[in-house]
Image: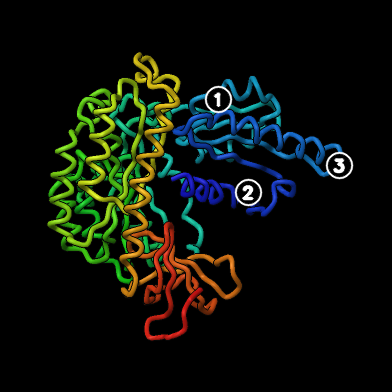
Amino acid sequence: MNVYDSARMADVLAPLGYTLSDKAEDADMVILNTCHIREKASEKVFSELGRLRLLKDRREKAGGGRMILAVAGCVAQAEGEEILSRAPYVDIVFGPQTYHRLPEMLAHAGRSAVLDTDFPPESKFDHLPEAAAVEHGSAFLTVQEGCDKFCTFCVVPYTRGVEYSRPVADILKEARRSVGAGALEITLLGQNVNCYHGKAPDDRNEWGLGRLVFELAGIDGLTRIRYTTSYPADMNDELIAAHRDVPQLMPFLHLPVQSGSDKVLAAMNRRHKADDYRRIVDKLRTARPDLALSSDFIVGFPGESDEDFRATLKLIEDIGFINAYSFKYSARPGTPAALLEDRVSEAVKEERLALLQGLLNRQQTAFNISCKDTIMPVLLDRRGRRSGQLVGRSPFMQPVHVEIDESFMGTIAELRIEAGYANSLAGIIAGEERACL
């Protein structure tokens, strides 16, 4: 989502003459686009700002003109005044809902520092220019923003605001434009993307994400559809039917569960129990038997007992995941969980995280190895570390390395998987005998 936002900021600034720079020291403007969901995010911002201040001062003393420093995103939204207090050399601080106003901010930045962390009544999407060219066959498309779930550990409702779904017509227009610019794959984005309920083209009804996926599948040239991040309780029958009936919808789903303990899930204010999650996964796999899952896990949430942790391990064993993001619980300022007692010690959190990640890594490696000798369509979207090597993404989001001509960049190639490793696959063009290193 931050990649999408960063690209749209570049689109907003392009009419003012700004283009992307490879190096910060050569830039007239540096924007730190930030995420607040991880621990110590704000301290990382201040550390980076300290480095950039040296570049800013050096450039101005050398007569190279002024460097504008800006902080965007969720850290800016949550700690805007603190940023300007601790780093008064920062010129602009703005939240994730106001970057469409960047030209106006720049006009005022020469006179004084600008702080814009309001939640404006108008949607930023109504004021953004058309997206720039698609790179390497893949495009992001935000369809939903914000969150009304208020999980007790999460800052997103406070930094991104209430749930908002873009109108269907606007999404279809942007999707067609992306496909026309070369996108073979579109990833639909949202903080709770499967709660999408956008205004229908007839202006009288609303469409859910499932209906939207069915409509997007009718766009000529769009061969892959993905969406992230989803919420288990919002996984409805229409969306499950899309997994069954829409071949363009990839057989990979990120479905965060956070814990396998009902007690912990209740303390997190998650709107599902562990067995609810199991039933949802059963429905999905009945609809799409080859569906593979990734998830999020938090260990050491306040009050989590050894029994609660074992319930999480049991859920992982029952479901099976090919990828996961797992973290030790860290209190986020301003969230209800930050006030909870019965904290789990750091030593116990470390031990639990190691056990959980060991299990998840074994599942991921086993799945990757099981892909050997299969043929997969792989979207090649970046260069590998070796000369003559490209890297792409399988339908299951695995990185796949292949020795192949540069002309295949941005295309979907049929690859025979020669080997599966802990974090990636290696392949060759289907039908070739030469092994890929």
- In the image, is residue 182 above or below residue 353? below
Note whether residue 137 is visible. Answer: no
- Residue 18, label in figure: none
Judge left or right: residue 248 versus residue 406: left
| Cα–Cα span, label 2 and label 1 | 25 Å
Please report whichever mark, 2 or 1, sits nearer to the chain's N-terminal start. 2
Question: Which residue shows up at 55% across the image and 66% down it?
Answer: 384
Question: Which residue shows up at 34% across the image and 41% down it?
Answer: 296
- Look at label 3 and name its amino acid: Gly
In front: mark 2 or mark 1? 1
Q: Which residue is mark 2?
A: 16
Question: Which residue shows up at 52% across the image and 65% down it?
Answer: 382
| Cα–Cα span, label 2 and label 3 | 22 Å
Q: Residue farthest to the right?
A: 62
Residue 222 spot, x, y in % from top left: 33, 67
Q: Tag 3, which secondary structure?
A: loop
- Residue 80, label in figure: 1
Q: Which residue is mark 3?
A: 63
Judge left or right: residue 352 versus residue 32: left
Residue 194: name its quadrant: top left
Tell me the crowding category of disc 1: few under 14, some 14 to 19, or many 20 or more residues within 10 angstroms, Cα based.
Answer: many
- In the image, is residue 388 above or below residue 28? below
